[in-house]
Amino acid sequence: IMLTVTLNYTPESLAGAILLRERRTDDPKPTGALDPRSPRLLDQVRTALRLRHYSYRTEESYVHWITRYILFHAKRHPQDMGRPEIEAFLAHLAVQEHVAASTQNQALCALLFLYREVLEIDLDGPLDIVHAKKPQRLPTVMTKAETLRVIAGLSGIPQLMVKLLYGSGLRLMECVRLRVKDVDFEQREIIVRDGKGMKDRVTMLPAALVVP
């Protein structure tokens, strides 16, 4: 009797299953190449960020820079690298890619978080970093008339959101996550829950948005 069994898998799902295997605690320290798509390391980073209540955008940014760092060094595991590799990567961003100072600083924060909070590795002293040049520019600010023309060109929910952003000083994600119960029409206040830094605050509700 011949029994034919069809396995329902694809190469991608099989690779994913292999990557999902946890490394045993008694395994030696990993060496050589590392696939940055491996959920083992990046999931540890995400978990550490969420335990410390970092914002979703910060989480995505940190994962992005850690992945770039690994790819830059030919997929070596971060445990096998340290200060020289971090300095080389940051210098590449400043010299070769001409990134802004804030972008380079964001990449630095991501790597410091990886080593200190996830891998628990001490980098032994300050880093010798080639800093990106910080441009000296004046901010461009729209006038009140220009802002009102932009608002007039919108309608519906987008217009209401822009009015809240402009009149209450809300950040974009604070406005998106705003709940009805956090709007106090009597006191004309808006309670922002879990804002930047996981802090609550109170801001004003513009009188123009209160329908009599």
Image (tube, rainbow, N blue to C red):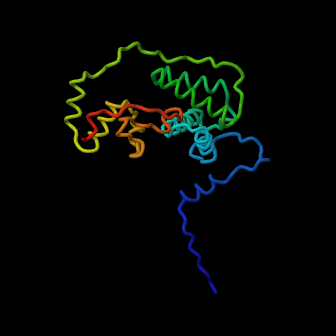
Tell me which corner region of the image, top left, top right, bottom left or bottom right, holds residue 112. top right
Seen from this angle, which residue lies furthest right? 26
Residue at x 25% of width, y 21% of height:
143
Seen from this angle, which residue lies furthest front? 186
Q: Is residue 13 above or below residue 209?
A: below
Q: Indicate the quadrant containing the N terminus: top left, top right, bottom left or bottom right.
A: bottom right
Residue at x 19% of width, y 36% of height:
153
198 or 182, nearer to the observer: 182
Residue 47: x, y in percent? 61, 44
How many numbered discs sit on the rendered protein?
0
97 or 197, nearer to the observer: 197
Residue at x 57% of width, y 35% of height:
66
Residue at x 62% of width, y 32% of height:
113
Tell me which corner region of the image, top left, top right, bottom left or bottom right, holds residue 127. top right
Q: On the rendered structure, is 84 left or right of 203?
A: right
Residue 10: x, y in percent? 53, 62
Seen from this angle, which residue lies furthest top? 136
Residue 110: x, y in percent? 57, 31
Residue 30: x, y in percent? 71, 42
155 or 10, nearer to the observer: 155
Q: Indicate the quadrant containing the C terminus: top left, top right, bottom left or bottom right.
A: top left
Tell me which corner region of the image, top left, top right, bottom left or bottom right, holds residue 8. bottom right
